């Protein structure tokens, strides 16, 4: 982990104005899981904006304690890269990539490729369409996202609301020894972001079953065979001139398919620090 963080820090040191470094650390708790107890999560990313675009690199590491661990505890590493390019005032194009390293899951060595476009009909109002291809050893996953967003202002509070639809289709039959029973999923979501004099708050929720989902604009992937059916997210923080600090909490409820375990809760609380220079 130290080696990967050093590489990203060296990359950040080569950047100049228009750059941002982000560090997120937190705890995970699992309730009613057949294997998982709790764990730690760490996410580090660097990003740089220039005249017509933005490039970002990220590294995520999860260490999870297991109930029984003949192979040792679960260790997950993920690397991601994303590039955005602005075409005029209304159109933005995106390409993204994720690499997965997992010491136990059948999705080890998986790769996720993404393409997307954002179009603004007018100031503060637009739509976004993304396509993702997850390439695993014994199966693939195709995901199609469509969202609409609208900015608004109430007094001195600025806000943005986003409506999201995700269609997920599995191409293949096996996740390890588990045979897929369902291969088509569709979930809807809503996000709300607020900013009042630098104090920020965010709320989000997803409804409907989903699996192997790509999240956070192509920078995160849920690569274990857990069929999620509820997700709630809350964040609170403060933005300063060059420095942000944000606390986030997420709750998910779903089913661990290979283990046949239903009603599994995943709770995550993290602290995120961003620095712009």
Image (cartoon, helix red, strand yellow):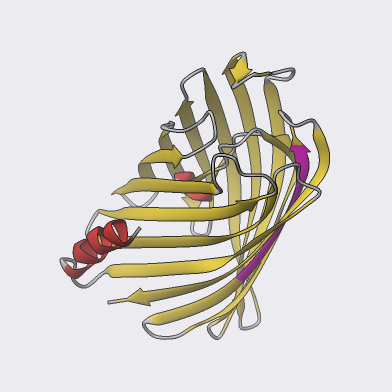
Residue 159 at x, y = what percent?
Answer: 61, 69
Residue 186 at x, y = what percent?
Answer: 70, 31
Relative to residue 210, is residue 241 drawn left or right? left
As rendered, which of 235 and 37 lies closer to the eye?
37
Q: Residue at x 59, y 43 (%)?
A: 147
Relative to residue 183, is residue 47 drawn left or right? left
Relative to residue 5, is residue 145 drawn left or right? right
Magenta segment's dominant SS is strand
Residue positioned most to the right: 263
Residue 215 at x, y = what percent?
Answer: 55, 46
As rendered, which of 262 and 230 lies closer to the eye?
262
| 16 over 206 or under it: above or below | below
| 217 over 15 or under it: above or below | above
Q: Residue at x 60, y 36 (%)?
A: 224
252 magenta-colored: yes
Looking at the rendering, in which quadrant would you find the N terminus? bottom left
Looking at the rendering, in which quadrant would you find the C terminus? bottom left
Instruction: State which region is magenta.
Output: 248-255
Residue 54 image-quadrant placement? bottom left
Q: Residue at x 76, y 42 (%)?
A: 34
| 204 over 105 or under it: above or below | below
Residue 166 at x, y = what percent?
Answer: 63, 35
Query: Visible in this render: residue 203?
Result: no
């Amino acid at each position: 982990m130290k080696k990967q963080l050093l590489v990203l820090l060296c990359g950040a040191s080569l950047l100049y104005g228009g750059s941002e470094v982000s560090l997120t650390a937190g705890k995970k708790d699992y309730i009613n899981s057949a294997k998982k107890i709790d764990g730690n999560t760490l996410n580090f990313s660097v990003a740089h904006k220039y005249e017509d675009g933005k490039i970002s690199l990220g590294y995520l590491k999860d260490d999870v304690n297991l109930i029984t661990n003949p192979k040792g505890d679960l260790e997950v590493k993920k690397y991601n890269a994303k590039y955005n390019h602005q075409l005029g005032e209304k159109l933005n194009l995106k390409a993204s990539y994720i690499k997965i390293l997992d010491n136990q899951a059948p999705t080890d060595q998986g790769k996720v490729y993404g393409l997307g476009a954002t179009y603004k009909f007018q100031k503060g109002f637009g739509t976004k369409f993304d396509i993702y291809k997850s390439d695993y050893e014994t199966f693939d996953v195709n995901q199609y996202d469509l969202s609409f967003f609208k900015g608004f202002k109430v007094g001195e509070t600025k806000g943005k609301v986003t409506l999201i639809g995700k269609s997920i289709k599995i191409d293949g039959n096996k996740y390890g020894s588990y045979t897929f029973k369902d291969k088509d999923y569709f979930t809807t979501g809503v996000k709300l972001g607020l900013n009042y004099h630098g104090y920020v708050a965010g709320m989000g929720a997803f409804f409907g079953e989903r699996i192997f989902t790509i999240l956070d604009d192509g920078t995160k992937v849920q690569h274990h065979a857990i069929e999620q059916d509820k997700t709630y997210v809350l964040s609170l923080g403060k933005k300063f001139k060059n420095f942000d600090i944000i606390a986030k909490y997420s709750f998910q409820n779903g089913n661990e398919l290979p283990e046949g375990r239903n009603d599994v809760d995943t709770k995550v609380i993290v602290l995120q620090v961003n620095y712009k220079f």
